[in-house]
Each structure stands twice: as C-alpha cells, then as structure tokens.
Image: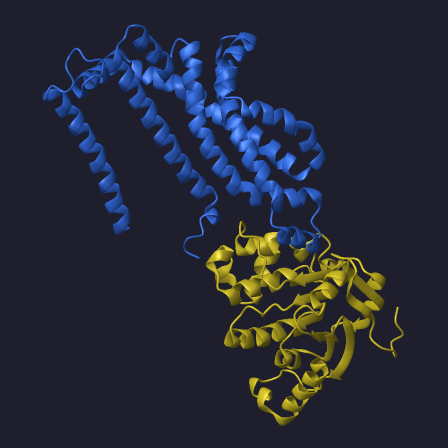
Chain colours: A blue, B yellow
Amino acid sequence: MERKRTSVLIGLGSVAAFLLLWHLAAVWGVLSPESSIPSLSAVTKAARNWLSEGFLSRDLAASLMRVIPGIVIGSACGGLLGLATGRIGILYQIVGPHLHMWRALPAVAVVPLLLLILGVNESTRIIVVSLGVFFPVWVSAHEGSAQVDPRFLEVARDLDFSPSQLYVRVIFPATVPFIIAGIRTGIGLAYIMVFIAEWIGANKGIGYRLSVAHSVLRTDHMVFGLVVLGVLAYCTDAVYRLAARRLFPWTEKKHG
Amino acid sequence: MADPGSHPPAVVQLEKLTFSFGQEPVLRDISLTVTEREFVVIVGKSGSGKSTLLRIIDGLLTGEGEARVQGRVRMVFQEDRLFPWYRVRQNVAVAVTRDATPAGEAAVAGSASARLSDTEKAMRLLEELGMRELAHRYPHQLSGGERQRVAIARAFVARPQIVLMDEPFGALDVLTREQMQTWLLDFWQRNTAAVVFVTHDVEEALILGDRILVIVDGRLRPVLNVNFPRPRPQRLRYAPEFLEAKQRVREQLAD
C-alpha cells in the first residue's frame, strides 16, 4: 500500500515536472511565440476555448459513442471466433489464411476502402473501430483456447461433461486471461482507428476536431486534442483493468 | 444379480489387460476384481504403470483385454486439478450429475433432495465435511490439504460406485498427509463407493486399505489382506504386526 502510494506520487511528480519545464521553455524564450511548438499557456487557452464552445463534451461524447460499441463488438466477435478456431482445426484451416492476411495489413490502410464501400456514416465508424479490436482479440482467444491445459480436459472427461459443458466450464474460462490481454491491446488500437475514421470522414469527435485544427494550422488546439485523446485512452485502459479484475478475480493470483 | 450367499458384486473387473505406449509395454496381463465398498490399494514405484491403470479404469485410456466397470467412476488426481476459475462450491457443483440421486431416495423424501440445485448439493456435502467456510474461496486461496479435500469432495458428490485415487496425498507434507488419511477413511466409511487408491507409500497403503497389491514392471500381484480393525488409530503405525506387514509389502516391491 505504502509502496503503491509512493509510485503514484512519483508518477504525478514526473508529469508536474514535465509541465513546469514546458512552461519555463516558453518563459525563457526557448519556445518563441512564432514557433510552431505551442507553449503551455497557449494550450490551456485552447482548452478553455474547447470548454466554452462546448467542443470538449460534444466531441468527447461522439468519440466515446464510437469507441465503446466498437470495443464491445470487436471483442465479442474476436473472442467467439478465437474460441472456435482454437479448438476446431478444420475451421482454423479454412478461415486462418484470410484472417492472417487481413491482420498483416495495417488496419488503417483498410479504412478509406471501408468508408467508400459502407458509406460515410456512424455504423461504418463503429465497424472501423471494431475491426481494430477484432484482430488482437481473435489472435489471443485463438492461442488461449488452443492451449488449454490438457489436465483440465482430462478432468472434464472424468466428470462426464457434455461438449457444451466442456466449452462453458473449461475452455471459455481457461481462455479468459488471454482474451483480457487481447482486449487491452485492442483498446489501444480502438483509439487509433477512431482517430483515423474521424479524421477522414466525420463532423464531430476528437479526431474531427484535430483535423479542423490542422487545416487552420492551430498547433495549440492540436496539442490539446492529443492530450484529450491520450487521457481518454489511459482512462479507458484503467477502467478496463479494474473491471476485468472485479469480474475475473481468479486471474490475479498474487495472494496465493 | 449376485446370489445373496456369494461374494459381494464386483464393480471393477479387469482380465488379461495389457497396455503399451508405442512398443513399450506399460501394463502386462493385469487381472483385478474390486468389489462393492472395498478399499483396494495398489503400491508401486514411479513409472510402474499405476496411473495408467487408473486411467484405463476411468475410461480415459483404452487397453487390450477386458475392462468392465459397474456404475459411475470418478478420479482424484495427483495434483488437485480444481478449476482455478471456480469458487470451491462451484468446483464441487460442476461434478453433480442429473441422475445423482437414486430414484428410491428421491421418492421417499418427497423428492426434496432431487429438487436441490447442484450448488445446494455441493454446499450440503461441504457442510457435512466441515468445509462450509471454504465454499466461497478460490482454489488459490486454499492450502494444499484443503485443495485436495475439495478435490475428493468433487469426486464423491455424484455418489459414484468407484473412486480412483492417484497418489492424492503425494504432494503433501507428512503430518498433513496423516491427517488426510484419517479424514479420507472417515469420509469413505460414510459413503458407498469402492476406492482404488494408488501410492508409493507402504505405510499409507496399510493404514488405508482392505487389500494391498503391488505393481512391478507393469505386472500386478496381490500381497495381503489388511485385517487391522477400523477405525485405525495413528499408533497402529508402531505396532509390531503393522511393521511386519510393512516389511512384507516392501519385499514384494524390491525385485
């Protein structure tokens, strides 16, 4: 506990020191007013502007309404498919090559095509996000379910589990820690994907706000937009980790 | 149906059973009959084929020759093998089967016990075994002895006719092991299952068993019937007749 508090304090101190140095750089003239690197005060001014114009709440809400359903859909599809391909050899032989080829592409490269095919609308943006989440979750669920401890499979046979009981009671829970790790990777990708989707075709969202700032060369607004995106991604990850620990307490065996 | 005057009915019957891993014979020409409610102990060194024999009886492996089993079989493995994702009560509850309650029993009690959910059945057993306070824990929150007790509860909860035990106390320290032996005997006597217990510990075999067999180089042979009355106290371990029996089993294992 004491140790945890110390590490939090060091983390906060490090952030504060960075902000101070940033500010001093402008005060001491390292960052001239003409420089394209904005000063801390310029960025805080941008922040106030976002707040007073209502951008922050509107764009934040818009981005979250894409990221959260995207994570849920991508995780569910990736998880279920991985649980199937990991245990059913023939299914993996059929769909594996396709999935691995798409996975090898940078997901963002597919976005312009998707926008053209599916149209520039809200469901396309959600699909784009879920696509980013889908692949890492599929890969981990596949790996996890393919390598379920054979000793547990033996217990399942000893206890006369039916095939559906085997999946529900053994294979799925044994794969959960892998899926949890896959979704964590997926969350990071979800923010990349939502940014791309909003940059290319949207009229609200943090990515959209950044593209507007970019088109008028407002680096102060762009930096603030990135800060918002970073804090948002960080918070999502923290909430997710907390929720995973609550829902699946046995995945953390520290006090054994 | 067995004639009332004859031997009690057999629950396990192996005849000329042989098993090989590739070219390597593991079990040779094994014959064994286990009767109802009997406690049979098989003693052997590691790699003597003990675990393989249990797996064949459990139906996890198939050998050549005859292996007949009457009724439900359950296995307690060397390591507890509890599902880490389930609390203790769920670990026991998943082993409950639909036909666990004999029809007669259900009819008598106004089918009260038939209506119990799997979890309720598990809780009843855990309570009976004095493990109520462990029911909400996860396996990683238990000691080695507690884990193995839960694994044994899991094996017995569906009222099997045969319980196979593969060195269940092998990983425990000596004192815990002795406590577990007493605990197991007490529990077994209140049940109706026959037990086939495999161990490399001769003392354990004599404390637990009605009958001892040894397995050497994949061959099974009977050594002795253990006639010490039950319950068997700890001090029995130092009785001359106990030490003598121990010596006899040892000799059979030596060659």
Given residues A76 and A28, the one toward you in this image is A28
The image quadrant where one finds the N terminus of chain B is bottom right
Residue, far front: B23
The answer to whether residue B190 of the structure is visible from this angle is no
The answer to whether residue B77 of the structure is visible from this angle is yes
Residue in view at x 18 percent, y 25 percent: A22
Please state the horizontal and vertical placement of residue B125, each as a whole percent of the image. 59, 62
**A64 versus B222 height, above or below:** above
Residue in view at x 55 percent, y 74 percent: B177
Residue, far bottom: B240
Q: Quadrant of residue B56?
A: bottom right
Please state the horizontal and vertical placement of residue A194, each as a whole percent of the image. 43, 19
Q: Quadrant of residue A52?
A: top left
Residue in view at x 45 percent, y 34 percent: A184
Q: Please give left or right for residue B202 compared with residue A70 in the image.
A: right
**A74 versus A166 height, above or below:** above
Residue, far left: A28
Please state the horizontal and vertical placement of residue A59, each as a whole percent of the image. 35, 16
Given residues A234 and B155, the one toward you in this image is A234
Q: Please give left or right for residue A63 compared with residue A144 in the image.
A: left
**A247 versus B215 height, above or below:** above
The image quadrant where one finds the C terminus of chain B is bottom right
Please state the horizontal and vertical placement of residue A53, each as a whole percent of the image. 26, 11
**B221 versus B168 height, above or below:** below
